[in-house]
């Protein structure tokens, strides 16, 4: 889990440096800088969410280890505490945790939510900057060509091609940001799935502990029942013996 956090943090730093370098290198026009600022905002926000989620998973893993060491006792309102409390509630209602109904209840009620990916948003922002730049450049060049000489037309065309680097730069920055976001998201989901698998395994262990406690209770109950049966049988024997003795004494007194 710590490796995932460090990897996502490193990708965030590298991605920001690369995006800033690309923005200055391509030299996007004013509208391009607006698009680049939007891409930066989405990128930073998505990476912060990934870092927060991975950190939460690491904290819940520590709580899970503590819960195992304490034999199922855990306090708080985290994911592990809610799962253990819900599992014990189901066990108290005589519902097996390995049943499909219990699995649905446990999975849907307690878990770590993963937000939707924003990689598509940065790609669309980059494409929007590119198409808007092409449209603006073509419209500007068309008006300049109509009202200029041959040399002016050549200068306009040259300026148009020079601006192409900045126009297509927004799309490249959007694609690069999406690549970093997808890599970070995959690591975040992998760490979350690993934690959920460990939590599910521990939940099934609670079913085993409950069955052990129930079997011990059944054995104790059976021992008590056998003890009561033995006492009742001995009391019946003693009562019969006393009755027979009293009958004999009464008979002897009657004869005398």
Image (cartoon, rainbow, N blue to C red):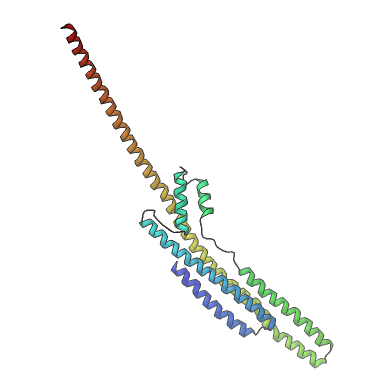
Q: Residue at x 79, y 92 (%)?
A: 152
| Foreground of the two, 249 or 140 | 249
84 on left or right of 234:
right
Quadrant of the rendered image containing residue 144: bottom right
241 on left or right of 176:
left
User: How far across and down, in percent of the image, does residue 127 sit?
Assistant: 68, 74
| Foreground of the two, 33 or 92 | 92
Whether residue 200 can be seen here: no
| Foreground of the two, 184 or 228 | 228
Quadrant (top left/top right/bottom left/bottom right) for the N terminus: bottom left
Quadrant of the rendered image containing residue 143: bottom right
Q: Residue at x 72, y 76 (%)?
A: 131
- Picture layout, residue 145 above or below residue 103: below
Quadrant of the rendered image containing residue 117: bottom right
- Picture layout, residue 109 above or below residue 117: above
User: How far across and down, in percent of the image, does residue 235 sit?
Assistant: 26, 25
Quadrant (top left/top right/bottom left/bottom right) for the C terminus: top left
Whether residue 157 can be seen here: yes
- Picture layout, residue 80 above or below residue 99: below
- Picture layout, residue 68 above or below residue 119: above
User: How far across and down, in percent of the image, does residue 82 sit?
Assistant: 47, 55
User: How far across and down, in percent of the image, does residue 146 sit?
Assistant: 84, 87
196 on left or right of 215:
right
- Give the mark count: 0
248 on left or right of 153:
left
Identify the residue at the far left of this view: 256
Q: Residue at x 67, y 71 (%)?
A: 124
Identify the residue at the far top of this view: 255
């Amino acid at each position: 889990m710590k490796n995932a956090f460090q990897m996502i943090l490193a990708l965030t730093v590298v991605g920001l440096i690369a995006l800033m370098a690309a923005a200055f290198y391509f030299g996007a026009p004013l509208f391009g800088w607006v698009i680049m600022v939007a891409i930066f905002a989405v990128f930073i926000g998505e990476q912060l969410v990934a870092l927060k989620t991975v950190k939460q998973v690491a904290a819940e893993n520590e709580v899970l280890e503590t819960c195992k060491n304490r034999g199922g006792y855990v306090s708080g309102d985290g994911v592990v505490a809610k799962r253990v409390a819900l599992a014990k509630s189901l066990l108290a209602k005589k519902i097996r945790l390995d049943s499909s109904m219990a699995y649905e209840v446990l999975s849907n009620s307690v878990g770590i939510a993963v937000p939707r990916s924003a990689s598509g948003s940065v790609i669309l922002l980059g494409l929007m900057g590119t198409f808007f730049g092409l449209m603006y450049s073509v419209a500007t060049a068309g008006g300049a060509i109509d009202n200029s000489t041959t040399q002016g037309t050549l200068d306009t065309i040259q300026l148009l091609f020079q601006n192409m680097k900045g126009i297509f730069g927004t799309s490249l920055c959007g694609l690069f940001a999406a690549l970093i976001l997808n890599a970070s998201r995959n690591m975040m989901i992998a760490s979350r799935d690993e934690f959920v698998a460990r939590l599910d395994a521990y939940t099934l262990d609670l079913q085993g502990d409950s069955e052990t406690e129930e079997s011990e209770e059944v054995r104790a109950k059976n021992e008590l029942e056998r003890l009561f049966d033995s006492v009742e049988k001995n009391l019946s024997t003693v009562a019969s013996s006393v009755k027979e003795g009293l009958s004999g004494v009464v008979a002897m007194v009657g004869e005398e």
